[in-house]
Amino acid sequence: MTGAALLQGGLLPEGLNVSFKLLPSILVLSMLGLFLAIGYVFRVADTEGMWVAGRSIGNVENGMAIGANWMSAASYLGMAATIALSGIYGLSFVVGWSTGYFILLIFMAAQMRRFGKYTAPDFVGDRFNSDTARAIAAVTTFLIGFVYAIGQARGMGLVGLYIFGDIGIPGLSGYQSMVVFMMAITVGYLTLSGMLGATKNMAVQYVILIVAFLVGLYAVGFTQGYSTLLPQLEYGRLISELSTEFSAPFVNESYYLWIATAFTLVVGTCGLPHVLVRFYTVESERTARWSTVWGLFFILLLYLSAPAFAAFGTDLFAANVGPVYGEGGMSSAAGDVIVVLAAQLANLPQWFVGFVAAGGIAAAIATTAGLFIAGSSAISHDIYTNIINPDATQREQVLVGRLSIIALGIITTLAALDPAAPIAALVSYAFSLAGAVLFPMFFLGLWWENTNRQGALTGMTTGLVIWFIPMLNEVAPNYGLFSGMAGEAGVISPALAQWVPAVGSALVATPIVFIVTIAVSLMTDEPDLETKKMVRQCHSPEPMGQQQTAEDVISTDGGETPADD
């Protein structure tokens, strides 16, 4: 058996009908064509449109974009997968992600919009008057985009494989060929459209994914006799019939890991650059707040439904394929497509299963778009324009941004050909990084005016180091040079994996970064008066204009522009 065949065999979901299907293929190709057309119609030529959509997006449209941007393959596929495979532990994802948005709504949405920059690293660089802090934030943003997007590429590859079968790219397995195909489409429309076209696409993608998910859930529940009008509640009748691994608390994972994962997802949500940059695309702080409310509503429509889909899929898998838990149980690949698998095992028409699968592809593409825009803007705007070439023209900035999208697409595709973990776990690594490095800077930067450059630099460096240690312990042994370092448990140090797990390392890292940042800020000089005025302006009750920022207000009030390093 060849290496490619071995890889494909390990990644293919058991029980899933992998073959070319005409009607679902037409449906998905039409959808991908629509995304490309929207990207072309709303193509941009300047940085204002490329990075912040001209600050012209309304609250409902931005709420839909927040929903699509947020609900990735990890939400559409991975959340139900984690609940199906890990039972109660999977609910930590529902709790963590939902709670994070409440913190964004109350403490950060309007304040970030009032500060009014182009990117998340832009905020860090100007708030702490430091190009070094800007560079660390930009590299972190790029890393988050890379790690997060691997999970999306894996989801697109698995679902696309169900619809198109093996498209036969020489030298690649069916799964790998589909990853390359889907990522090429995604990178193609993003290089054309930038943030403006991505936002218009996200609104369309939200409609597709939420309709596909909810209609799929209702169809599976009704045809199999699980539910009628409210499957989100009626699935409870099925719990007693499922294995204890699904329903009993902390059978699969420990209480500590549940807390660590939920905490990491809360703070990670508040530190993800592609989430925060959505507040820069609207005209005012009021719109930023209302778009968060709409976004949370749109997200909860799916989150309240995912446990029901997991329960239905688990029961159908046990009845039609084999045991779900224990030796020979459901693989992580099958779990990752449990939403599609449930529709197939319920004997729904092939075109309908294809429609449910198309929703998963729309979710993965929407999030990848947001991640790539945030990652490329970090390179083009924050590193190239602000540090390397301050005299760069608009055309040069947009060109560097487009090249950055292509580069991010290539390395993500290569990593997704042999991913190290299921979708939800891959995404959690990105949340750990965002929660450990960026969230403390955003929160302290907005709410404590005495946070200074030295504190931010020390805190961000500390967060990066703490995040890297569990990644080295758990993830690195999956690859070449480090594979010999792992023990029987598959990690270098089981004790470290237990108390500082890679999926939940922010539980340890975030409090330490807060303490370090505050302590160093107290021991060094306070920020200048102008920086303090900008922080105060973020909390002012006075409304600001569509293109106005806190810095603009301070400048017209006699202040000076922030100093550089």
Image (cartoon, rainbow, N blue to C red):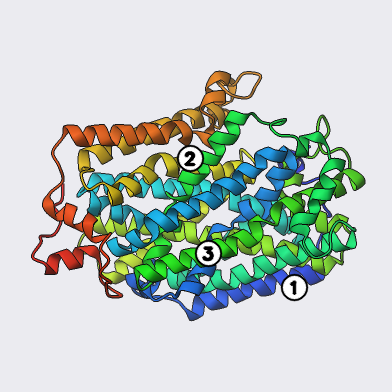
Residue at horizontal 52 percent and vertical 67 percent from the top: 294
Marker disc for residue 26:
1
Which of marks 2 and 3 precedes in the sequence? 3
Mark yes or no: residue 8 visible: yes
Give how far across and how far down residue 28 sits, in percent. 70, 69
Mark 2 crowd level (few <14, some 14–19, many ≥20, 10 Å Cα): many
Element at badge 3? helix
Quadrant for residue 364, please give it. Answer: bottom right
- Mark 3: which amino acid? Gly
Q: Position of residue 498 (x, y in %)?
A: 57, 24
Residue 179 placement: quadrant: bottom right
Q: Which quadrant: the N terminus?
A: top right
Distance (Cα) linking label 3 and label 1: 30 Å
Q: Nearer the viewer, residue 538 or 350?
A: 538
Q: Nearer the viewer, residue 116 or 429?
A: 116
Label ID, residue 432:
2
Identity of the residue drawn at 77% across and 39% down: 246
Which kind of residue does numbered mark 1 sit on?
Ile
Q: CA distance from mark 2 to mark 1?
A: 38 Å
Residue 388 rendering spot, x and y as whole percentages: 24, 54
The type of residue carrying mark 2 is Ser
Labels 3 and 1: the sequence-earlier one: 1
Residue extending furthest toward the left: 558
Q: Please rate how many residues cluster around mark 3, counting C-alpha atoms within 10 Å: few if below 14, some from 14 to 19, many from 20.
A: many
Left/right placement of residue 340 relative to residue 63 reads: right
**Label 1 near label 2: C-beta < 8 Å?**
no
What's the mark number on residue 295? Answer: 3
Q: In which image quadrant can residue 318 be found? A: top right
**Contact (Cβ within 8 Å) of mark 3 with mark 2:** no
Q: Secondary structure at mark 1?
A: helix
- Marks 3, 2: nearer the viewer: 3
